[in-house]
Image: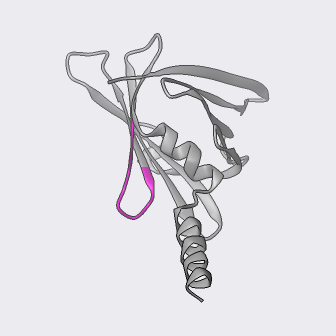
């Protein structure tokens, strides 16, 4: 009986510690990242409610300027990337739904948005990641890839 109870408790504790694929990749994003070849940093954190947030900051001028706020939240079974780019879209957030996730890749999509329609994060290792921003704008496919290195 004690063995059965111990196995049951162990099974329950393993389930509660289990991270989904999106959570594994999101956990890898935590920290401060430098966008190579730019004066941009992206700083990710996890909030008490289990969502993820990032602040994108430009360090090009004398004073750092916040460029974008990002939230990744779970609503029901869906994960959403919600980006608010300052000075664009009247400051309103744009929502992208998670289409695919592995422990080292996140792919968010919003085909109704003008540009971009796709945002992907690729975790290369603990110190490197890439973001791919792509879509069609005015009938032409566009994309740009940003290489990031983790800052101390």
**In the rendered image of this protein, does residue 87 appear above or below residue 100?**
above
- Quadrant for the C terminus in the image: top left
Residue under the image location 71 percent in, 24 percent down: 142
| Residue 54, horizontal then vertical, whole percent | 41, 42
Can you say whether 113 is above or below 128 in the image?
A: below
Is the residue 113 above or below the residue 137 in the image? below
- Residue drawn at x 45%, y 57% is 51
Comparing 27 with 78, the one in front is: 27
| Looking at the image, residue 11 lies above or below residue 30 | below
Q: Quadrant of the N terminus?
A: bottom right
**Residue 32 locus on image (x, y percent):** 37, 31
Residue 50 located within the stretch drawn in magenta: yes
Residue positioned 64% across, 43% down in the render:
103
- Residue 58 in percent (x, y) is at 34, 24
Observer able to see residue 68: yes
Q: Is residue 113 magenta?
A: no
Q: Which residues are magenta?
A: 43-52
As drawn, is 145 to the left or to the right of 42?
A: right
Q: Position of residue 4 (x, y in %)?
A: 62, 83
Residue 95 is at least partly visible in this image: no
Residue located at (79% from left, 29% from top): 139
Does 148 sit left or right of 4 as displayed? Answer: left
């Amino acid at each position: 009986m004690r063995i059965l109870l111990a196995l049951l408790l162990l099974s329950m504790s393993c389930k509660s510690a289990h991270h989904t694929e999106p959570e594994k990749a999101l956990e890898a994003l935590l920290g401060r990242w430098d966008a190579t070849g730019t004066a941009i940093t992206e700083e990710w954190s996890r909030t008490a409610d289990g969502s993820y947030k990032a602040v994108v900051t430009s360090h090009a001028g004398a004073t750092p300027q916040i460029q974008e706020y990002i939230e990744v939240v779970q609503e029901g079974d869906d994960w959403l990337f919600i980006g608010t780019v300052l000075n664009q879209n009247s400051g309103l957030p744009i929502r992208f739904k998670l289409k695919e996730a592995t422990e080292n890749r996140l792919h968010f999509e919003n085909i109704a948005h003008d540009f971009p329609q796709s945002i992907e994060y690729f975790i290369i290792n603990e110190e490197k990641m890439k973001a791919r921003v792509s879509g069609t704008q005015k009938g032409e496919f566009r994309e740009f890839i940003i290489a990031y290195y983790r800052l101390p």
